[in-house]
Amino acid sequence: MAEATVLVVDDDAGFRAYVRAALEGDAFRVVEGTSAQDAVDVALRERPHAILLDWRMPGGSGIVACRNLRAEADLTGVRIAMITGLDDERDRTLARHAGADAFLVKDGDPDALTRQVRRLLVAP
């Protein structure tokens, strides 16, 4: 797989570092944001292939950011995954309705994260 850019948007610097360590060097380039507004701003500037959005962030939720990203014509085709520490069916439904392509649970397994991001990029 050619290098793909992944935008990780999370207010937790430790989690962003974890994602960077898990993905970089494995055909991924990681760029970061810390808020819902960053999600849109950085995505428009960097044109990532995939975006991992935290559910709860300062300045707006990942759900709001997902809706805003989907409203941007320049970001059509970008794959979006909501990523959270809780696995709840109601949250999964909200994420799908907001336009998320996937729902990932923060589980601390870097190999699983890499596999999930690869699946996100190749899914229809």
Image (cartoon, rainbow, N blue to C red):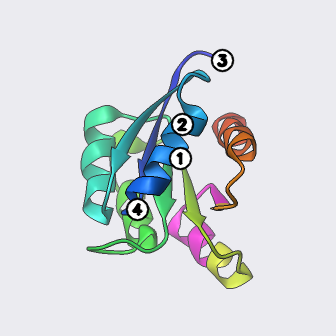
Where is residue 52 drawn, in percent x and y?
51, 52
Residue at x 51%, y 69% (from the top left corner): 98
The crowding category of the residue bearing disc 1, from other C-alpha atoms within 10 Å (few below 14, some 14 to 19, many at least 20), is some
Residue at x 67%, y 55% (from the top left corner): 108
Q: Earlier in the sequence, mark 2 or mark 4?
A: 4
- Dot 4 corresponds to which residue? 12
- Dot 3 corresponds to which residue? 1
Identify the secondary structure beneath mark 3: loop
Q: Nearer the viewer, residue 28 or 46?
A: 28
Identify the secondary structure beneath mark 2: helix
The crowding category of the residue bearing disc 3, from other C-alpha atoms within 10 Å (few below 14, some 14 to 19, many at least 20), is few
Q: Nearer the viewer, residue 25 or 99?
A: 25
User: Label 2 near label 1: C-beta < 8 Å?
Assistant: yes
Mark 4 or 3: the one toward you: 4
Where is residue 75 drawn, in percent x and y?
39, 43
- Dot 2 corresponds to which residue? 21
117 horizontally vs 3: left or right: right
Q: Nearer the viewer, residue 33 or 39?
A: 33
Q: Earlier in the sequence, mark 3 or mark 2?
A: 3
21 horizontally vs 90: left or right: left
| Span colored in magenta | 94-103
Amino acid bearing label 1: Tyr
| Residue 107 location, quadrant | bottom right
Where is residue 38 drawn, in percent x and y?
27, 55
Amino acid bearing label 4: Asp
| Whole-number angstrom distance, CA of label 1 to CA of label 2 | 5 Å
Identify the secondary structure beneath mark 1: helix
* Res. 84 in view: yes
User: Label 4 near label 2: C-beta < 8 Å?
Assistant: no
Amino acid bearing label 3: Met
